Amino acid sequence: MPGGRVDYSGAYTDFVLMHSTSRSRLYRAVRGGKYFMLKTAATADGMQEASLRREYELSLGMQHQHVATVLTYEPSLPVGPAIVMEYVDGTDLRRFLSTNPDAATRRRIFSQLLDAVAYIHRSGIIHNDLKPENILITRINNDVKIIDFGYSADAAHYLTRTLGGTRRYASPELLERADDIDSRSDVYSLGVIMADLFGGNYQRIRRRCMSDERSRRYRNAEYLQTAWSRRNWRRRAALAAVVVAAVSGVFVWTLGRTSDMRQAVDEASVRVESLASRLDSVAEAERIAAERRRETVDSVVGQCRSSVDAEFERSRRAISAEIYCDFAERHVAAFDASVRQITDAAYAALDVTSTAEVRRIVDPEIAEKRAALASLARSLQPMIEENTSCEEEFLYYKSLLRGGKPFSRWRQ
């Protein structure tokens, strides 16, 4: 064991069952003088073991300071096939909250949790089972470590058709076993975890996370992370503005009159809350407009990509069928003209800001495709007299180019 005699055999020993559910077991074990966590299936059922392997495959690429690191998969151990993870010396979030940590610690934990889930979402994975039991808090520094990707799904594959998540933390669509679960399901779970951490505070953010309508939730953890980072600036700005006005306009008149000063402060507090509420409403409207703009941009980008890809493939085939680069270069010019029509039609329906955002994404992709077509055209032989059988053939091809006609074989 750690601190005692080291076993250099490479075998895992001293297995201690730490946690057990209907589908998995979590053990602590020792190898080479170090602790490790081992996750096994609860039974030898083939589906549970397949789920365990799938979890390993999904988790293997995760490299984030607040996600427990998966090290390897051991197919044959005394406790059964197991995922081997770094050992986290700590407790789960539910037990940690029972110690009544201060508000600053709670906020820091939630910020770390958002950072980890945003990373998971950027990796194309939905956790599907975010709850306090799957969020470990380290004994040193009280840092977050997310575990248990047993219900996770990537963009193309669901692990099982078994319901993921504990019911209180599961989104409505997860409870209904919908086929189109996305990252907003995790956002719902984060909203419930916010209630565990902060009680009735941050209601505006929490209500949006937990909306029954997915379209009203934050799109993913990264959007929620942005809202969380901006949670206080409007209220602080409102407080500063009202307090300055209250102090500068009222203090002179209430100097020496404590009751009047107290009344003035109370009135200022009411005005702070009223102004902050209005600012929150304006901010909410701005966020909704920004998300709608983002959805419009994503849609237009997708349409442009689809149309440009089709035009690129048509032009590539046409160039590949040519013999001379002179004729092939006309297909590059035709590609330019077609793409210009595609993008002009797309941009006509957008405002200036959205157009600039779409162009920032689409223009480099178009330039890359055009360069590929131009390179393919240049790889063909030039149409010069030396590359034809006789002067008459050369003049025939030249006349086709001048007339803008497609290539056709010269016949004597």
Image (cartoon, rainbow, N blue to C red):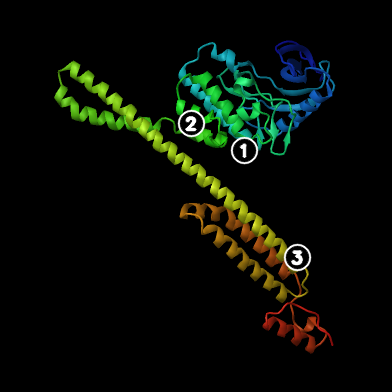
Residue marked by disc 2: 228
Alpha-carbon distance for marks 2 and 1?
Answer: 18 Å
Q: Secondary structure at mark 2?
A: helix
Residue under the point 56% across and 19% down: 142
Q: Amino acid at mark 3?
A: Arg
Q: Determine contact: label 2, label 1, CB under 8 Å.
A: no
Task: Return the mark for residue 317.
Answer: 3
Image coordinates of residue 346 in percent, x first then y, are 56, 58
Residue 375 appears anywhere in the view: yes
Image coordinates of residue 113 in percent, x first then y, are 57, 27
Q: Which callout, 2 or 3, points at the residue further toward the start of the chain? A: 2
- Sort mark 3 into few (<14), some (14-19) or many (20+) by Cα contacts within 10 Å: few
Q: Amino acid at mark 1?
A: Arg
Q: Which callout, 2 or 1, points at the residue further toward the start of the chain? A: 1
- Sort mark 1 into few (<14), some (14-19) or many (20+) by Cα contacts within 10 Å: some
Task: Return the mark for residue 122.
Answer: 1
Image coordinates of residue 325 in percent, x first then y, are 73, 74
